[in-house]
Image (tube, helix red, strand yellow):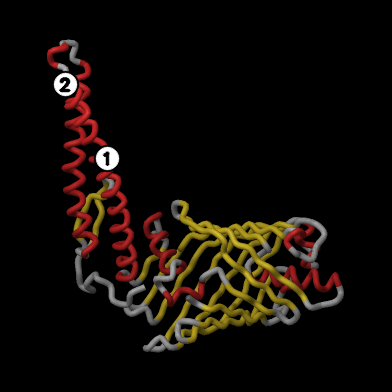
Amino acid sequence: MNSTPTIDANAAPLPIYLNGKLDSVYKTPEIILFNYNVLDIDTLETELSTIKNELYNNSMDTDPVNRYHDTIISSKLARMKVIQSDLTTLNKEQDSLYHLYTKDYLQHKRVTFLTFGPKRSRALFDFIYDGSGKRFQVLNNTGFTFGNNTGSIYSELVSGNLGIFRVSLGSMISSSSSEDNETAKEEEAFQRLASYGGNTVLTMEYPLAYIHSRNNQYNLISRFIAKGSADFPEFGTTTDEFAGSASFGIDIYADASLSNNALRFFMNLNINGIFGTDTYQENLGIDNSSFSFGQVTLGLIVAENIKLSFVLGSFSSESSLQNRNVILGGQILH
């Protein structure tokens, strides 16, 4: 993400019609091009409507003398196809221009709280996940973690936007060095819980807040995150039966960097309500299949390329899950 927005700090918003609704925008290159395209779209839509009406009215005329010659009909139909193709291209360009503007707007506005519609959600998730904003790659759902006797690797397989939500599907491999099967089963289950949730995870995210300084030296992002996880024995899980869970929670990320961005320190806090199957409960060795669980993670990013993190504390309604062990995480940022 750029550190210099194209919106002037003292600029005032101006009215614009977007999809038939009045909105307020700032004068940026994207909005200027957007306005030019609006004029082009209006011109093409008027021409298309005129041709359609001419052809339709002529087709309804019962007097054969007035019928258009076949070459004229073919010419007008061909022109309609060209116009429709041009409109499709322009409308896609409009979406792209307004998306770029929305990203610039989020960077210009220092506090955005509970006002994330589909466009703002998509723009913020682009900052976090698509690689154009390196300072938020720490939130990317790819990396490795190590516990006392356990390790895991997680990779996001597919992702996309669905309205106001970002939806992703990921997979994780975890293992334990413990020789006792029961101990290994519990350690692996906790490793999955403390990292990404399961060996197959479906995640839905919605942004709640984005707060930052003018140069993005300080940032805070809050998200609502819902997950559905599944542990399949066929995928290498130390369990004889399928185990599944659903979780709903709040995630808060905050960071601060040096002026040259050589080091960025971050904190991540999350708390979730988790609802699991009986096998999920048994694998964790806890008393209830429904429980709360949260963690505090601290870490740093070196030269925008290497991430190191430590889960320093965990809290839960299940006492056996509280402060179980320190988990080290790492990631190579692209």
**Residue density around tag 1, few if under 14, some if 14–19, many if 20 or more, within 10 Å:** some
Residue 215, quarter of picture: bottom left
Residue type at mark 2: give it: Tyr
Instruction: Locate the N terminus by quadrant.
Output: bottom left
- Please give the residue where the numbered disc 1 appears in the rendered image: 84
Residue type at mark 1: give it: Gln
Residue 260, quarter of picture: bottom left
Q: Nearer the viewer, residue 242 or 65?
A: 65
Q: Is residue 149 found left or right of 110 in the rendered image?
A: right
Sequence-first disc among 1 and 2: 2
Q: Position of residue 263 (x, y in %)?
A: 46, 87
Q: Tell us which disc is closer to us: 1 or 2.
A: 2
Kindly state the secondary structure of the residue where label 1 is placed. helix
Q: Is residue 94 above or below residue 209?
A: above
Kindly state the secondary structure of the residue where label 2 is placed. loop
Residue at image position (56%, 78%) is 331
Residue at image position (28%, 53%) is 94
Q: Position of residue 294 (x, y in %)?
A: 63, 71
Residue 286: tell me if it is visible: no
Residue at image position (77%, 75%) is 176
- Please give the residue where the numbered disc 2 appears in the rendered image: 68
